[in-house]
Image (tube, rainbow, N blue to C red):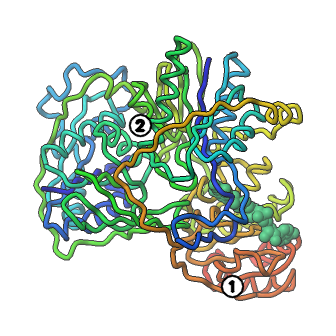
Amino acid sequence: MDILVCIKRVPMVGGRISLTPDGRGVDTEMLGFTMSPHEECAVEAAVRLVERDGGSVTALTLGPPEATDQLRDAIAVGANAAILLKTDGREWGPTATAAAITAVAEQHQAQTGRPYDLLLFGNEAADTGDYQVAVRVAHLLGHPCATGIKQLEVDVHGVHARREYRGVTELFELPLPAVLSVKEGINLPRYPSLPGRMRAKKAQIDEVDPEWQGDGLKLDGLRVPISERRQAAILGHGVEAVPALVDLLERLGVLS
Amino acid sequence: MSVVCFVEQDAEGVIVDSSLRAVTFARMLSDQSGEEIVAVALSARARGSGGAGPGSLDGAGRNPAEGSLSEGVGQQGHEVLGAYGVGDVCLLVLPRTVGYAPRALATGLAQLAGAARASAVIAASTDHGNEVMAHLAALSHLPMVANCSEARRVGPTTLQLSRQRWGGSLIEDSVLEAAVALLTVATDEVAPVLAPAASEPAARTFTPELAETDIAVRAIESRDATSGVSLANAKVVVSGGRGIGGAEGFAAVEQLAGLLGGAVGVSRAVTSLGWRPHSEQVGQTGTRVSPDLYIACGISGAIQHLAGCQSAKVMVAINTDPQAPIMGRADYAVIGDVNAILPALVDALSQRSR
Ligand SMILES: Cc1cc2nc3c(=O)[nH]c(=O)nc-3n(C[C@H](O)[C@H](O)[C@H](O)COP(=O)(O)OP(=O)(O)OC[C@H]3O[C@@H](n4cnc5c(N)ncnc54)[C@H](O)[C@@H]3O)c2cc1C
């Protein structure tokens, strides 16, 4: 089985988020970067399937040249190949991103005579949260798709994908080839092994220069929501504070 | 012209709160333009019958009884939607065995939006809402904007929008240029507000023309017996972070949650370390909670964690570090070692109840 797994590089924002002076981006000067959490799980799901049934995992990202770091992270945990859709730092909307990914999948089919059996995505990117790239790719390729998947089985009949919604388990049965987006919790991603890291360092990364296109949404600017900035009232230090805590719980009416 | 709003119902057929928020949001646009809001719901038979054999288009909507109002949002749902300013309630009738089929819903919405000359189609930013709207966007080759909190029309095909990024930790202001605006609504940001005057909405059904591909992917539903207090709805959540130090430390977290009739939550650091299951994770990529009381134990207060517990009424932090970011959000704090404080607190509470 050949799997394409699409990941996104996002800054590791911690306790507070600061913006660039022009207010159009997150100031990442002091930040590290990571793969979006849902996509870490997508990579893990892909690697597990291929470990069991054979085949290949190709990691793909659309992003700046530095996004090769995240592709190498994917190789370090078991992906076999990687493709960078290189951008010039401009933000790409979901329509353009989906078109560029679709072009890669179509080219793969033209070259090998077979489509990717499975295309995996994160349910939504951690930063922009657009909730649609996977669905758009599915429509462009004419594949069935399901989103927000938390449990996945693949056998000769195809994909059995489950998720929870309002206390109900929803099972989707899809024939291959298929497109799925997954959520964190579908598995616990492994840490890279030492040989994995070595392999990642040396791996060749294919580059593609896709063409940017607009999609009707133009950014004016970003802002940090004005949240009530509080200063916690200190009840005390260490176990000495326990009586004050009990009083508080009593006042809040949470003690039976 | 109209604003179409997709509304969801729970297992009992009651319109869910997030959809009332979506309708409230739709009014931001319809109030400005004088357009009518058309609420679109899924017929009960389609809603409740997922998985009953293979879905088929044969006999779709042939039964005249199918899609009657009683199968729709019900009298009560009708009144509620009227109270929120809906002018027209439209029941989407799907073949009886289909159930939740996102592409079929999107196809139905596309046909309905065309017939109603919709300037916008709106849904709550839920798993179903986002999924259906993404299909609608792909089918109709239009942009879709997720997690909107504000919308203002500034031109015939132009909207000024605010939307959430980073699970609500950042707001994006942007301008959308689209023949039909496809938006999902950040329901934690938009409160449900009744319309100044209630309307008496018209009721009708709509049977879309579907192709086999529209119904090929659909949910087969099963209800699990859920045990214990559900994290999402708990009145009290006691959460542990990396500061708990290991899986064993969660015994005290569980005991405290038990004594307060609450649920256990954790940070992503804890699930990544394998100390606790992901089902307990609170945050942007976990569960969103809005309890009366949130106790954060050994949690630093990263924005992605706060994205999931921002709306707690009262927050208490227990942390060794008085400078931790959580101190800027918590109402009360105890500075110190959580592994000494929690067992002492559990002891004090147990003795008290004796
Ligand atoms: C895209 C993305 C999505 C994310 N989604 C989520 C999410 O959904 N949920 C989530 O929680 N995180 C999420 N994260 C991770 C988040 O950024 C933080 O890394 C994480 O929340 C940190 O968990 P923590 O507070 O337990 O650990 P830390 O940040 O390591 O904090 C531990 C805290 O414990 C305190 N402490 C240590 N020892 C003790 C002690 N003995 N007694 C008392 N206090 C002590 C320390 O002072 C510190 O404040 C996400 C990150 C990214 C990049």
State how far apart marks 1 and 2 are (Cα). Answer: 45 Å
- Up the image or down, A141 lies above or below B302; here it is above
- Amino acid at pointer 2: Arg
Is residue A239 found left or right of B334 in the rendered image?
Answer: right
Q: Chain of mark 2?
A: A
In the image, B219 versus B44, the foreground residue is B219
Q: On the image, which quarter does residue B96 sit in?
A: top left
Determine if residue A114 is in view.
yes
Question: Where residue B55 sits in the image (x, y, percent)?
Answer: 32, 23
- Amino acid at pointer 1: Ala
Question: Where residue B198 sits in the image (x, y, percent)?
Answer: 16, 70
Whereabouts is ligand 1, in terms of quadrant?
bottom right
The residue pinned by badge 2 equals A136
Cβ at disc 2 under 8 Å from ligand 1 = no
Q: Chain of mark 1?
A: A
| The C terminus of chain B sits in image quarter | bottom right
Q: Which residue does the image show at 62% across and 42% down from the upper left?
A: A39
Q: Earlier in the sequence, mark 1 or mark 2?
A: 2
Tag 1 secondary structure: loop
Give the label, 1 or 2, closer to the camera. 2
In the image, B146 versus B156, the foreground residue is B156
The residue pinned by badge 1 equals A232
